[in-house]
Amino acid sequence: MSMLPQNNEFRITVLPLFASGHIIPIIDIARLFARHGATVTIIATESNASIFQNNIDHDFAAGFKIQTHIVSFPGAEVGLAPGIENYSDVSSRHLQAKIYQAFLILDKLIDQVIIPATRPDCILSDLSHPWTTDTAERLGVPRLVFSVSNFMAYSAEHSVMQHSPHQKVASDTEEFEIPGLPHHIQMTKCQQPEFLLRRDRFTAMMESNKQAERRSYGTVMNTFYELDGVYLEHYKKITGIKAWGLGPVSLAVNKNLREKIERGNKSGMESEELVEWLNSKEPNSVLFVSFGSMTRFPPPQMAEIAHGLEDSGINFIWVIRNKDKNDSGEAAEGLPEGFQQMIKNKNRGFIVRIWAPQLLILEHPSTGGFLTHCGWNSSIEGISAGQPMVTWPVSSEQFYNEKLLTEVLQVGVPVGARRWWNMSDEMKEIVSRENVEKGVGFLMGATEEAAAIRERAKQLGAAANRAVQSGGSSENNLISLMKELRSIKVNDKD
Ligand code: UDP
């Protein structure tokens, strides 16, 4: 048996992908590792660091060995305005490509200079940084991949990539089974990510990400064994690498009010008024409506959501990220004229501009349901809070997540979104106000079926909370992973 070295320090260098939906959970994981004794260095650009630095500063002050290494962003070199460093801050393909270009420049520096300077014993990096497998190999340390998904969605996407079942159907809307999964999952061609249907630049990127993943030490995801353990085992079989569910990571580290408000947030605005409004409402009477950090719907879709919510008669909080200013140009963004005044007068709803304290809202006793775009972070945050969901997938792997939520876990009901949509293209099919009203009315209603969904959501929420407590599956995973990583370091030194 190896002896631990006198210096018991174990250094983990963390490299996020700079989109809010990727940054938020990997930072939670970084904070978790620090709580388990690791010395953690997060690499980030200044504007990206600003959305999590407060929590890191508090952790550091509390005695955890965690800090951020700021690298300057070469935005000017590719013609980007100052402060635009995060994929979630832009919606056009053109600007996203520029951010990508700037990171290509930066990646070289991070690979050659910054990561080596942090003297890592382990690199934890987003799936989208395939080159970090080589960095880790060069430095003789393990690379852990962070995949911003769950094992079920990963397995479904992998199966479609491998077997192309969509090529055997006659139309976009004919159902086919996703082969080889532990459950019978039926889907259609128009629910599949664009890059799986026809080869493009993104297809090649995904392939290279996955090849590098296979050569890495293992993968961690923000999920837990009781949720998709059967798919975790499946994942290990299809990839041949190790894997751990460490989640729900938001539950494991964001314990106090300040942390919940400041998670992923630059300003912490509007929270007080919002909480006051929620406090004034009956238990389980408010629906939370959010489409994550990226999605911006065109005006006709916004109008249908507004009418559907209005017609449902249900209280709601709706996060609108379409523009930066309050109370102007309702018509331009598709809201019916006078909509905001109406909900104010009737005290029916609350519109949050730009960024909502999502954890706080989901955990509030007045919140009784979540209309979500099925981004995985939002999904698992909804699960953690025991919320039943109306599922409205838009892009990425969200249609697979919908299947997980509505059919495997049965904690949600579909709104009826049928077509995967790349935000920079025209939206070919919108969800009608009738569907919105029906989905929301059903979820928040009094039928036995809705009550069963709510009960299952509550049970799953309890399981999520147990997973991150002492003795829980995710907590145990983290302890054994840390032990394993430390023993690799010791053995390498022998
Ligand atoms: N989020 C938030 N407030 C908002 C919008 C998003 O706190 O107003 C957080 C949300 O809690 C989640 C993340 O941003 O942690 C969004 O990630 P998700 O995977 O749900 O969707 P994406 O933004 O990647 O589409």
Image (cartoon, rainbow, N blue to C red):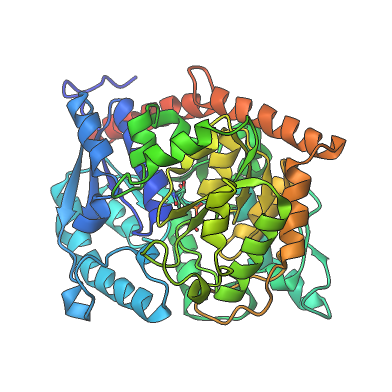
Residue 368 lies, in percent from the top left, at: 64, 37
Q: Which residue in the rendered view is the most extreme toward the front?
A: 345
Q: Which quarter of the rendering shows the N terminus?
A: top left
Write the residue at 14% across / 58% down.
Answer: 113
Q: Residue 97, percent across and down?
A: 36, 77
State the image quarter where residue 485 is shown: top left
Residue 240 in view in this figure: no
Q: Which of the pair 374/359 is nearer the observer?
A: 359
* Residue drawn at (34%, 29%) of the image: 487
Q: Is residue 73 left or right of residue 260?
A: left
Q: Nearer the viewer, residue 352 or 291?
A: 352
The quadrant the C terminus occupies is top left
Q: Residue furthest right?
A: 448
Picture layout, residue 3 above or below residue 399: above
Residue 29 x %, y % = 38, 38
Left or right of 463 on screen, residue 33: left
347 to the left or right of 78 = right
Say if 27 sits above or below 17 in the image.
above
Could you tell me if residue 7 is visible in this image? yes
Depth check: give the residue in front, 313 or 435.
313
